[in-house]
Structure formats: C-alpha cells, structure tokens
Image (cartoon, helix red, strand yellow):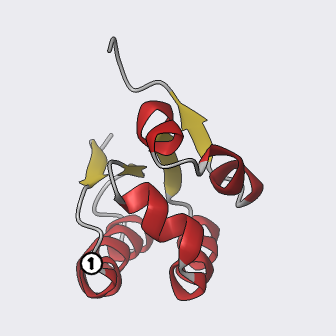
Amino acid sequence: MKDKLNILWINDNPQTAHTMVFMYAINAKTQNWFDEVEIIIWGSTAKLVAEDESIQEKIKMTKHSGVVIKACISCANMFGVTNKLKSLDIEVDSMGIP
C-alpha cells in the first residue's frame, strides 16, 4: 500500500492553486503516486474558494479525480464562509484541538 498525501493549502493566490495545488493533487491521485490524496483548505484560502468561481470549478474536477477536499471549520468560520464551502460539497470539520 502506498502512503497518503495531505496537501495543506494555505496560499490564497489563485495562480498557486491552479499551477501547484490542483495540478499536483490530481496527478498524485490519477498517476497512483499515492493511494489517498487530500487537500486541506486552511486560512484565507477558505475565502478564495468561496468567492472564486474558477477555483470552485477546479475543485469539482479535482474531487471527480478522487481527491478528497476538506476545510478547517475554524478558518471557514473566521471568514464567514462555512455554509458556502458546505454548499460546494466540501467537508468542513475541526482539524485538531484549538
């Protein structure tokens, strides 16, 4: 069994999302570099996801490839985007003891 890859997505720059986060996650999953691939939306990235439609489309595509996408509930609450992230079918959950 291969390992699990967790990508902690902390940079709210859309270009970083398109040219690193999504590209690497999709390839890691579809090329079988890892058995499980998960992106964790963290910090101001939660706001980017909630507001940027091109990012939202890329999230759908990424999930379709088998990548799991989750978001930190504390971060989502901080930016007031919890319900929006949930509406995008993103699991919003606690990522540890605050």
Q: Is residue 76 above or below residue 94?
A: below
User: Quarter of the image holding residue 12?
Assistant: bottom left
Position of 3 with respect to 77 (left or right) is: left
- Residue 66 showing in the rendered view: yes
Position of 49 with respect to 84 (left or right) is: left
Local packing at callout 1 (Cα closer than 10 Å; few below 14, some 14-19, many 20+) is few
Of the pair 23 and 31, the residue shown nearer to us: 23
Position of 32 with respect to 60 (left or right) is: left
Q: Position of residue 98 (x, y in %)?
A: 32, 15
Three-letter amino acid code at the position of disc 1: Asn
- Residue 65 showing in the rendered view: no
* Residue positioned 59% across, 51% down in the render: 81
* Residue that mark 1 sits on: 13
* Residue positioned 59% across, 76% down in the render: 56
Position of 66 with respect to 40 (left or right) is: right
Q: Position of residue 24 (x, y in %)?
A: 28, 74
Q: Position of residue 90 (x, y in %)?
A: 63, 51
User: Quarter of the image holding residue 53?
Assistant: bottom right
Residue at disc 1, secondary structure: loop
Q: Quadrant of the N terminus?
A: top left
Q: Is residue 67 above or below residue 25?
A: above
Q: In the displayed image of the protein, which residue is found farthest to the top? A: 97
